[in-house]
Image: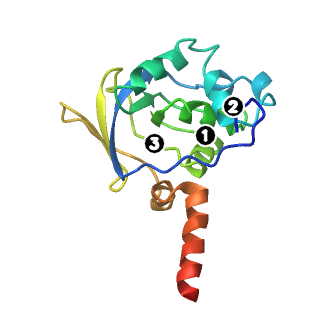
Amino acid sequence: MNGRNARPQPSSTPPSTSFFTGKVAFKFGDDINTDYIIPASLLQEAWNKSFFAEHAFERYDPSFVETCRLNSSNGNIVLVAGKNFGCGSSREQAVYAIQCNNIKAVIAESFPDIFYRNSINNGFPALAVESTRDLQIGDRLSINLENLSLRKEESDLELKISMTNGDRDSLLTGARLGAVKERLRKRLLATA
């Protein structure tokens, strides 16, 4: 369905594998709040997740959407930030705004609980690492969700991803939608 008020799209598909690579296309500092990501004035404008992608970071970084378009044709892109990425008010649309711009993951030093949970529930990797100081725009990263590690290619830098096994498993199985599908599959197999 097209249009600004189309029904919400299903949750994103999970990462196709527990291992993926991505190029750092953005590096933001500390305390990037949800109003920077998607302004509150737009929250009631549409149901379609892609609507929010069109307005992602428009006041904070007006080049964000265009940079995503240019970089996503060259493979996966990731966003790197400092501490407290996604702070502020609770809005799931902040996750959609990033996710629907073909960002494969956000890597930050910390996330507020609500943003983190919204990300994981929507199958979007919000990956906390001890420090993002040595990650720069243009770096290529190898991310292994299975063993919760991140490696900067062409370097010996390896960072541990801080995430529970349950959250990792949720990402790998498709988040909420994937969990429901798996439960239904098991029920069907049990009755067969």
Q: Looking at the image, is 73 positioned above or below residue 115?
A: above
* Residue drawn 73% across the image and 30% down it: 3
Q: Looking at the image, is 66 positioned above or below residue 170?
A: above
* Residue drawn 56% across the image and 55% down it: 175
Label 3 near label 2: C-beta < 8 Å? no
Q: Residue furthest front?
A: 1
Tell me if 192 is positioned left or right of 74 in this view.
Answer: right
* Residue drawn 57% across the image and 80% down it: 188
Q: Residue furthest bottom?
A: 191
Label 1 near label 2: C-beta < 8 Å? yes
Question: What residue did someone put label 1 on?
Answer: 112
- Disc 3 secondary structure class: strand
- The mark nearer the N terminus, 2 or 3, is 2
Tell me if 146 is positioned left or right of 120 in this view.
Answer: left
The amino acid at mark 1 is: Pro
Q: Looking at the image, is 12 positioned above or below residue 40?
A: below
Question: What residue did someone put label 2 on?
Answer: 88
Which quadrant does the C terminus fall into? bottom right
- Disc 2 secondary structure class: loop
**Numbered mark located on residue 74 in the image:** none
Gap in angstroms between the C-alphas marked 2 and 3:
18 Å
Q: Nearer the viewer, residue 185 or 97?
A: 185
The amino acid at mark 2 is: Gly
- The mark nearer the N terminus, 2 or 1, is 2
**Rendering coords of residue 169 (x, y %):** 46, 60
**Rendering coords of residue 156 (x, y %):** 18, 35
Question: What residue did someone put label 3 on?
Answer: 127
- The mark nearer the N terminus, 1 or 3, is 1
